[in-house]
């Protein structure tokens, strides 16, 4: 008889949610975590970065206080205090996760797990002792980490990864960020807000290259207007570090230039945490390090499941959590609905924020779908004007034949909070006609969604 009905390896946003759901369904559950519960997201990603972004927001508001008839002398700031606040937020939430595991009678084991067989794990405990446990089912939720790139060796001092940046209490005068995706954009905004001279180097022809081109262009304009330098279609050839600065060689259009900076933040490259798991002991093969799964989170071995970043599906915390619940309910025989990755929300929390799901305009056209586009700018919203947050737009990509939203793309203040309404509309197969008829409270930013829906039919009122 096995020790547990299910063992979860990794207590990140996928693993701990899965463990709790399993316990709710009456399964005897263990979760193994070698670091702090909550994973990278809670400890060194989503949560602490949002805390720093809030600090940047407050600082920028204070810089413009005279607009609101508020004045003061000698504005000063302490970035070290901002970092400390972010760690306080993290500690509060990790304590909360530990409480939830205990409340639900999930056994939390601190250590590193290695497969001995498909039903047993050897654990090197935090105290140095070893323990072997068995489980009828095992769920791999070990996440991913930043991939090491030979041209950009991380020294954790001059050349940093995001974890280093979230732990550094000083603001560099000059910082070069490699990668213009979500992580790069968020740190660029934080550093720029605190007075750094920021340069983003992006390999693709635009920053946030996975987002709609129009949204990317809008963020580029906002960043450059705020003094952030952006070099796209560029690659880092080498980094030469000295005692307190770096010289970065950048290739663009066949020419090489050098940029001197105080810090380099490498925000590109991901690899799955599957090494040292002993997958070779059970014959579980990976694809470039990631664990292949089906729509029920099954791996190639019947009692072993995988979720989250380690699968390489969509490297987002909320996707991992959803996959965790799906895996557990499939194990329990509840036959949950399949996850629809086409409506999985994506969010970037720089200022202005980015939020999206589904197909971009170009992707829809490439697939031969006849589409209508609806747009509405923040500059035509009464609430946005009152808040002095007029930098933004909502763009809807709609299937012309059936009137359903197949893509939503937004840039603007707090647009990440608007995404759920559009996701629900999509999930329930609602049309832009129905969204256009939905009465929104006035004045709110959410009215922009209604106007964008009406615009797909040429019926927007306020533009």
Image (tube, rainbow, N blue to C red):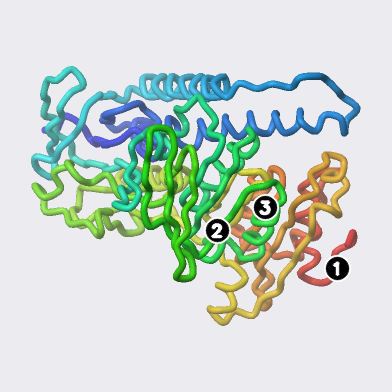
Q: Quadrant of residue 26?
A: top left
Distance from the alpha carbon under mark 2 to that under mark 3: 11 Å
Which badge, 3 or 1, is on the more N-terminal residue?
3
> Within 10 angstroms of label 3, few (less than 14), some, or many (20 or more) residues?
few
Percent x, y of residue 405: 65, 65
Quadrant of the rendering where the C terminus is positioned? bottom right
**Res. 190 mark:** none
Residue 140 visible in this rendered orientation of the protein: yes
Name the residue at 79% across, 57% down.
Answer: 377
Q: Is residue 401 above or below residue 255?
A: below
Q: Nearer the viewer, mark 2 or mark 1?
A: 2
Which badge, 2 or 3, is on the more N-terminal residue?
3
**Residue topped by disc 1:** 459
Q: Are the two marked residues, 3 and 1, in contact with CB atoms closer than 8 angstroms? A: no
> Within 10 angstroms of label 2, few (less than 14), some, or many (20 or more) residues?
some
Residue sitting nearer the eye, 172 or 266:
172
Residue 442 visible in this rendered orientation of the protein: no
Quadrant of the rendering where the N terminus is positioned? top left
Percent x, y of residue 400: 68, 76
Name the residue at 80% across, 66% down.
Answer: 455
**Res. 231 mark:** 2
Left or right of 136 on screen, residue 369? right
Q: Is residue 359 above or below residue 151?
A: below
Distance from the alpha carbon under mark 2 to that under mark 1: 39 Å
**Residue topped by disc 3:** 224
Which badge, 2 or 1, is on the more N-terminal residue?
2
Label 2: state its secondary structure: strand
Distance from the alpha carbon under mark 3 to that under mark 1: 34 Å
Residue sitting nearer the eye, 224 or 109:
224
Q: Quadrant of residue 114?
A: top left
């Amino acid at each position: 008889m096995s020790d547990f009905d299910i063992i979860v390896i990794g207590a990140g946003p996928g693993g701990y949610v899965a463990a709790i759901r399993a316990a709710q369904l009456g399964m005897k559950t263990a979760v193994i975590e070698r670091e702090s519960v909550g994973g990278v997201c809670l400890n060194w990603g989503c949560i602490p970065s949002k805390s720093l972004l809030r600090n940047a927001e407050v600082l920028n508001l204070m810089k413009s206080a005279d607009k609101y008839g508020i004045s003061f002398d000698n504005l000063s700031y302490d970035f070290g205090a901002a970092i400390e606040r972010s760690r306080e937020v993290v500690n509060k939430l990790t304590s909360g996760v530990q409480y939830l595991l205990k409340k639900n009678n999930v056994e939390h084991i601190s250590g590193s797990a290695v497969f001995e067989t498909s039903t047993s794990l050897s654990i090197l405990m935090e105290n140095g002792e070893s323990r072997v446990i068995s489980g009828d089912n095992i769920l791999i939720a070990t996440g991913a980490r930043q991939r090491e790139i030979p041209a950009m060796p991380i020294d954790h001092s001059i050349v940093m990864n995001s974890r280093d940046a979230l732990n550094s209490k000083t603001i560099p005068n000059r910082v070069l960020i490699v990668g213009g995706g979500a992580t790069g954009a968020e740190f660029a905004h934080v550093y720029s807000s605190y007075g750094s001279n920021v340069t983003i180097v992006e390999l693709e022809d635009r920053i946030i290259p996975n987002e709609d081109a129009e949204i990317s262009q809008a963020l580029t304009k906002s960043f450059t207007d705020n003094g952030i330098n952006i070099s796209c279609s560029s690659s880092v050839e080498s980094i030469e570090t000295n005692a307190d600065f770096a010289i970065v060689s950048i290739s663009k259009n066949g020419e090489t230039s050098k940029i001197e900076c105080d810090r380099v933040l490498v925000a590109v490259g991901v690899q799955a945490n599957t090494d040292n798991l002993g997958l070779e002991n059970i014959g579980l093969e990976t694809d470039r390090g990631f664990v292949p799964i089906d729509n029920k989170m099954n791996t190639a071995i019947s009692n072993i499941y995988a979720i989250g970043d380690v699968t390489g599906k969509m490297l987002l915390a909320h996707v991992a959590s959803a996959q965790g619940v799906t895996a557990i309910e499939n194990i329990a025989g509840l036959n949950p609905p399949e996850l629809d990755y086409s409506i999985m929300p994506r969010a970037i929390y720089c200022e202005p924020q980015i939020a999206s799901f589904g197909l971009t305009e170009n992707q829809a056209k490439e697939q031969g779908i006849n589409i209508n586009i609806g747009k509405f700018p923040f500059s035509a919203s009464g609430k946005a004007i009152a808040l002095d947050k007029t930098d933004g737009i909502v763009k809807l990509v709609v299937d012309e034949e059936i009137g359903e939203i197949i893509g939503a793309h937004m840039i603007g203040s707090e647009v990440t909070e608007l995404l759920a309404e559009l996701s629900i509309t999509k999930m329930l197969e609602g049309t832009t006609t129905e969204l256009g008829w939905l009465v929104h409270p006035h004045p709110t930013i959410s009215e922009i969604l209604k106007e964008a829906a009406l615009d797909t039919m040429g019926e927007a009122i306020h533009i």
